[in-house]
Amino acid sequence: MRELERDSTSDTPARKRLAIVGLGRVGHALATALAQAGYPISGPLGRGADGSRADAVLLCVPDAEIARAAAQIVPGPLVGHCSGATGLGALAPHEAFSLHPLMTVTAEGAEFAGAGAAIAGSTPPALALAAELAQALGMHAVEISEHDRPAYHAAASIASNFLITLEAAAERVAGDVGVDRALLVPLVRATVENWARLGPERALTGPVARGDEDTVARQRAAIAEAAEDLLPLFDALVQATRELAATAEAQPA
């Protein structure tokens, strides 16, 4: 993959007429943000929209619906999707692009500025449009190859989705001893900031990193008592953390 340079000296390009297809969170968030960036927007539109009178159509639909939605679009406009894992083949026979914001989108919307964006294009104009949209939203565009898209999306899922799953497990165990989620939040925020600033090896703390196996064993016994179904997750994380700690020890101080 390669990060695309942002040209702050070029004139602002003429804004293309965009049709946004998809009534979910991403469709609404991108329609709002791109309209604020100065693009004439149609939508978000429901499924079956044909993209007529638009210069480009952005499909914000589930991955399984991309090919079907693309088939409804009239020939002519550039057609893109917002999937992180899906390639451009699903948009055939259109001149295709993709724009995947590396940002979580909730019912409350999203702040795209400063986030990453995975882009691709089947032609130079299509890739240029994807880069233009990312820049207009204040995102850092990175071109991801067709082959690398599943790995890229897996990394995004680990960093975001799986983090929520992990915190849900922590909240469950903490709740069993009367500790509220609010008390865990500052710890989580500090940990993420340390990881961002220092990297994983230097940010790692805790009993596994210290080699305190007695404490780890007591933790495991407590998990077995409070939430036995979490033991496989706990054991896998302990092993992965041991391996990370060993990597950290091998690095020069």
Image (cartoon, rainbow, N blue to C red):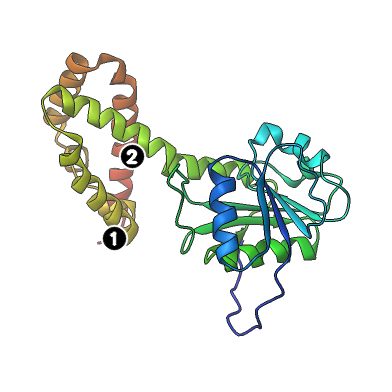
Q: Left or right: where does residue 90 sit relative to residue 150? A: right
Of the residues shown, which amino acid type is indicated by label 2?
Glu
Q: Residues within 10 Å of mark 1 (few under 14, many from 20)?
A: few
Q: Quadrant of residue 17?
A: bottom right
Q: Which residue is mark 2?
A: 243
The quarter of the rendered structure image containing the C terminus is: bottom left
Residue drawn at the location 76% of the way across and 57% of the way down: 56
Alpha carbon of mark 2 to alpha carbon of mark 1: how far? 16 Å
The quarter of the rendered structure image containing the N terminus is: bottom right
Question: Which label sits on residue 38?
Answer: none
Foreground of the two, 70 or 48: 48
Residue drawn at the location 82% of the way across and 51% of the way down: 52
Residue drawn at the location 17% of the way across and 29% of the way down: 174
Mark 1: secondary structure: loop
Question: Which label sits on residue 252?
Answer: 1
Residue drawn at the location 51% of the way across and 52% of the way down: 102
Foreground of the two, 85 or 93: 93
Residue 133's spot in the image, x, y percent? 63, 63
Q: Left or right: where does residue 51 sit relative to residue 167? A: right
Residue 171's spot in the image, x, y percent? 23, 31
Note whether residue 152 is visible.
Answer: no
Q: Earlier in the sequence, mark 2 or mark 1?
A: 2
Q: Vertically, is 47 above or below 43? A: above
Mark 2: secondary structure: helix
Q: Nearer the viewer, mark 2 or mark 1?
A: 2
Of the residues shown, which amino acid type is indicated by label 1?
Pro
Q: Left or right: where does residue 39 sit relative to residue 234? A: right
Q: Vertically, is 12 above or below 195? A: below
Foreground of the two, 80 or 244: 80
Do the residues under discs 2 and 1 have CB atoms within 8 angstroms?
A: no
Residue 208's spot in the image, x, y percent? 21, 37
